[in-house]
Image (tube, helix red, strand yellow):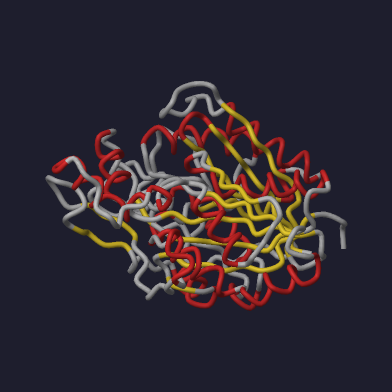
């Protein structure tokens, strides 16, 4: 096997289910049952969202300061690989295992009622703790849960947050600060985020339709996906990561797709691969008019007619957790135990938009071409923050 950085274990929860078995079953079957129209989130209308339906674990009293739905969601994913995490701590020591996690909303949802009370009465309730919504909470909770003393940080770069944790972990390991890392992220449904996207007129009132001519906006979702990452050889290697910044606009992507194209090119270059080596691409595919047009152009420029899909119709856009969630979908697709060779399907209405670059969208039941070992995923964020990552099945 090639010396490098490996994703040794995966824990996951999202609207498709809890754990690798449930999530993979729903993913490769193209299930959208976790998506639903809900009221009470926006003041004037219902909204289509993806919500986790499983029961989440509780936090112990000594970790009460971290008690938020976001951290409970993360804990659900961590517990799936708890034995793997404790094994690397035992092997390398608590000071040599880093925690690098991504989020966008953190525990804001748990503090919304307290903030409303402050606005109405001038006083926060006694139960209000700012630390719950501090983005650092995700990493600090994980650090304290496992009694770690190594580097611990949260990355919050909107929709690229949890994908960028892999790049940061690579740099820390290369610099000698740690030997392994808990990477990934979590994000939770909250009214602040939903109302923010509603104000931008980016929310779809129905199931989102990435790359369709009828696309009219995103669905927001929630979830968590975490990996143990180290130099210890295993089935899935992080072959190359490309990071760029458009410097174009705070909320609108560069219409030329230059930054997105460059992220994919850098990922290919670092992995030592060409476009023809990529057997599947997980698209960022938000189903907004501008993002899909830009990404289609960039994909056509760099990868041509690679089999590709957006999985957001099955999970919603999980914001800060989207990057690690979709990296997890590559990880699952590379494991015959979970995928049986199937690729994540593109769920939409089949209505091609002739005004954007044609993409080879994966239909339900399609299997990866025999011999393809490499897959790529894209994540693009507000502010023109882009990341593409190539994983290889060893």
Q: Position of residue 143 (x, y in %)?
A: 61, 59
Q: Between residues 270 and 363, which one lies in front from this camera angle? A: 270
Indicate left or right for 325 with 353 as reference: right
Question: Which residue is found at the position 26% from the left and 62% from the top?
Answer: 36
Q: Quadrant of residue 161?
A: top right
Question: Which residue is found at the position 17% from the left and 52% from the top?
Answer: 46
In the image, residue 57 sits, relative to residue 185, either above or below, namely below
Q: Quadrant of the C terminus?
A: bottom right
Question: Which residue is found at the position 83% from the left and 54% from the top?
Answer: 4
In the image, residue 292 sits, relative to residue 126, either above or below, namely above
Total number of numbered labels?
0
Q: Is residue 373 visible?
A: no
Residue reaching furthest to the top: 248
Q: Is residue 198 visible?
A: yes
Q: Between residues 176 and 277, which one lies in front from this camera angle? A: 176
Question: Which residue is found at the position 69% from the left and 73% from the top?
Answer: 86
Q: Position of residue 370 (x, y in %)?
A: 71, 65
Q: Position of residue 33 (x, y in %)?
A: 33, 69
Q: Between residues 288 and 71, which one lies in front from this camera angle? A: 71
Q: Quadrant of the N terminus?
A: bottom right
Q: Position of residue 65 (x, y in %)?
A: 43, 59
Indicate left or right for 35 with 116 as reference: right
């Amino acid at each position: 096997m090639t010396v490098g950085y490996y994703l040794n274990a995966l824990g996951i929860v999202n609207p498709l289910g809890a754990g690798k078995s449930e999530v993979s079953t729903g993913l490769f079957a193209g299930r959208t049952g976790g998506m639903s129209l809900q009221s009470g989130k926006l003041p004037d209308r219902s909204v289509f969202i993806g919500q986790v339906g499983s029961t989440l674990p509780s936090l112990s009293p000594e970790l009460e300061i971290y008690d938020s739905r976001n951290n409970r969601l993360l804990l659900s994913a961590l517990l799936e690989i708890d034995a793997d995490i404790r094994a690397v701590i035992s092997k390398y020591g608590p000071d040599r295992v880093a925690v690098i996690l991504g989020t966008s909303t953190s525990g804001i949802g748990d503090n919304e009622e307290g903030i409303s009370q402050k606005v109405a009465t001038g006083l926060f309730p006694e139960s209000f703790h700012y630390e719950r919504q501090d983005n650092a909470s995700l990493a600090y909770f994980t650090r304290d849960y496992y009694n770690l003393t190594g580097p611990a940080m949260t990355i919050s770069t909107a929709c690229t947050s949890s994908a960028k944790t892999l790049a940061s972990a690579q740099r820390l390991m290369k610099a000698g600060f740690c030997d392994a890392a808990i990477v990934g992220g979590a994000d939770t449904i909250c009214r602040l985020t939903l109302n923010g996207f509603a104000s931008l007129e980016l929310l779809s009132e129905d199931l989102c339709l990435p790359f369709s001519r009828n696309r009219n906006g995103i669905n927001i979702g929630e979830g968590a996906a975490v990996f143990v990452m180290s130099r210890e050889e295993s089935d899935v290697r992080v072959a190359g990561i490309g990071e760029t910044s458009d410097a174009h606009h705070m909320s609108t992507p560069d219409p030329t797709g230059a930054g997105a194209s460059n992220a994919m090119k850098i990922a290919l270059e670092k992995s030592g691969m060409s476009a023809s080596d990529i057997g599947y691409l997980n698209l960022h595919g938000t189903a907004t008019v501008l993002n899909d047009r830009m990404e289609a152009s960039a994909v056509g420029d760099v990868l041509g007619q690679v089999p590709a899909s957006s999985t957001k119709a099955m999970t919603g856009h999980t914001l800060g957790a989207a990057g690690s969630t979709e990296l997890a979908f590559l990880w699952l697709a590379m494991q015959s135990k979970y995928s049986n060779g199937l690729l994540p399907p593109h769920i939409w209405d089949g209505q091609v938009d002739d005004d954007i670059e044609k993409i080879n969208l994966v239909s339900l039941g399609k299997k990866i071409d025999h011999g393809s070992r490499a897959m790529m995923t894209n994540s693009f964020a507000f502010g023109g923050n882009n990341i593409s990552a190539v994983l290889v099945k060893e």
